[in-house]
Image: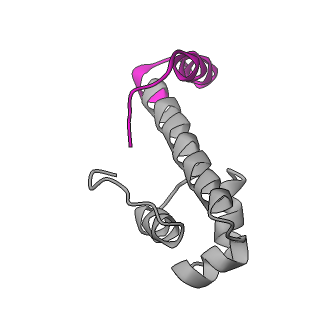
Amino acid sequence: MDTELTVEEQALVASIARSMGGDEVARKMAEQKVLDTRLVRKLTEARRASGLSISAVAERSGLPANIIVRMENARDRDLFEGDVREYAAAVGLELPQYL
């Protein structure tokens, strides 16, 4: 996944980081959140484009449907790499090794 932030994403990172204290740690945390949000958006778009329901992705991936819903609705604060990879495989995406 491309980790280069768009201008809009950079502005969002700056805004989030300011609200978290504005230091380097806050900026890194804000940047990761923006990248996670981008990844989940790509997964959701891939699921919809493939015509799969959340239930179908759950069945294919072995993940509980509620985890998929939480991911797609950005209610999971931390994305687990294994869950993301299972979801991606279920919708036909291959993720880079460094994820």
- Assign the N terminus to one quadrant of the image: top left
Q: Is residue 40 left or right of residue 72?
A: left
* Residue that appears at 69% across and 61% down: 70
Residue 2 found in image quarter: top left
| 45 relative to 91, above or below | above
Q: Is residue 39 above or below residue 58?
A: above
Please, what is the dominant secondary structure of the magenta stretch? helix
The percent position of residue 25, horizontal first and vertical second, equals 42, 28
- Examine the image and state in which quarter residue 12 appears: top right
- Please name whichever residue, 43 or 64, is drawn nearer the observer in this view of the structure: 43
Q: Residue at x 55, y 81 (%)?
A: 60
User: What span is in magenta?
Assistant: 1-26
Q: Residue at x 34, y 52 (%)?
A: 99
* Residue 43 percent location from the top left of the image: 56, 55
Q: Nearer the viewer, residue 24 or 51?
A: 51
In the rendered structure, the answer to whether residue 52 lies left or right of residue 30 reads right
Q: Is residue 64 visible?
A: no
**Is residue 28 covered in magenta?**
no
The colour mode here is one colour
Q: Give residue 27's position: percent from left, percent from top.
A: 47, 24
Residue at image coords 48%, 66%: 92
Magenta residue check for 22:
yes
Count the marks: how many?
A: 0
Percent coordinates x, y for residue 67 in the rendering: 64, 69
Residue lying furthest front in this view? Answer: 50
Residue at the left extreme? 97
Q: Is residue 23 visible?
A: yes
Question: Which quadrant of the view contains residue 66?
Answer: bottom right
